[in-house]
Image (cartoon, rainbow, N blue to C red):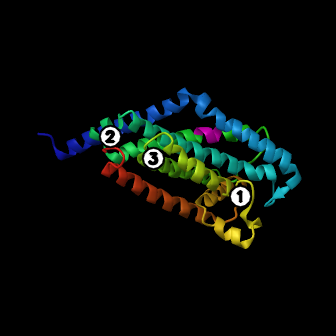
Amino acid sequence: MNSPHASSRSIAAVNWVAFKTLVSKEIRRFTRIWVQTIVPPAVSAVLYMMIFGKLIGTRIGDMDGHPYINFVVPGIIMMAVITNSYSNAVSSFFGAKFQHHIEEMLIAPIHNWVILAGYVVGGVCRGLAVGALVAAVSLFFTRITVENPLITVMVVVLTSTLFALGGVINSVYAKSFDDISIIPNFVLTPLTYLGGIFYSVKLLPDFWYNISLLNPVLYMINGFRYGILGSSDFPLWWSFFVIAVFILVLAAIALHLMNKGVGIKS
């Protein structure tokens, strides 16, 4: 007769294998078509840096005591990370629903949080890969010394995790491929563009400054900018607090939806 400890170890081993397999699948999925998943964001970043950093930036001068190109680079990197973390999770999870192989994982002896973690880590890996490429491309336009490497890594990983969770939630409710583009187009894009990528919110009138404070992306971009440049529009703890709260809330929602089988078991 197997002991409870042996049974627990066996279940843990199964879940670990499932997690590694899912993460490996997700990484292979976006690296296999790297021309479509990794290169386009880097091309877009080059255009942003050329137009806003070099052409317009030379006329603007400094922003918060930094050359304008240095000011916008952290925001451009973070925008690429956010978009690709979200896109990978939403498209992959919805693809699993559409092809009906998500059911195979749900009936397997795998915890739902393991499945969720696998898709989230896959989204994080793609977000970080694209972010690293955009950061490398930025070296052709400017030279930036990372002031706080640990803070930089922590902010970008946590932010990527947050938006990968958001992607899973979007895919749970999505009923068609058109549905997975609604949030990126009408929510994600406005939030990122109005999140202080190209300007300091200190320059805004009081009314718009107060409105901007409701944008969570603003704190993420400023936290990342602090890690790279050492300056931010807000105290650093604001950034970590906002990110942590959203991660906890979205993780709880995503896990609840999976446990209930919303959009999956119907």
Measuring 54% from the left and 30% from the top, which residue is drawn there?
31
State which mark lies toward you, 2 or 3.
3
Q: Which of the image's four quarters has the C terminus? A: top left
Q: Residue at x 50, y 59 (%)?
A: 246
- Reading the image, the residue beneath label 1 is 230
Q: Can see residue 136?
A: no
Residue at which label 2 appears: 15
Tell me the kind of residue under disc 1.
Gly
Q: Are marks 1 and 2 in contact (CB under 8 Å)?
A: no
Circle 3 residue? 168
Please give the range of residues in magenta: 129-133
Q: Residue at x 65, y 38 (%)?
A: 41
Circle 2: residue type? Asn
**For residue 180: magenta?**
no
> What separation in Å lies between label 1 and label 3 (alpha carbons)?
33 Å
Mark 2 / mark 3, whichever is N-terminal:
2
Which mark is in front, 1 or 3? 3
- The picture places residue 218, in percent across and down from the top left corner, at 64, 59
Q: Main secondary structure of the magenta part?
A: helix
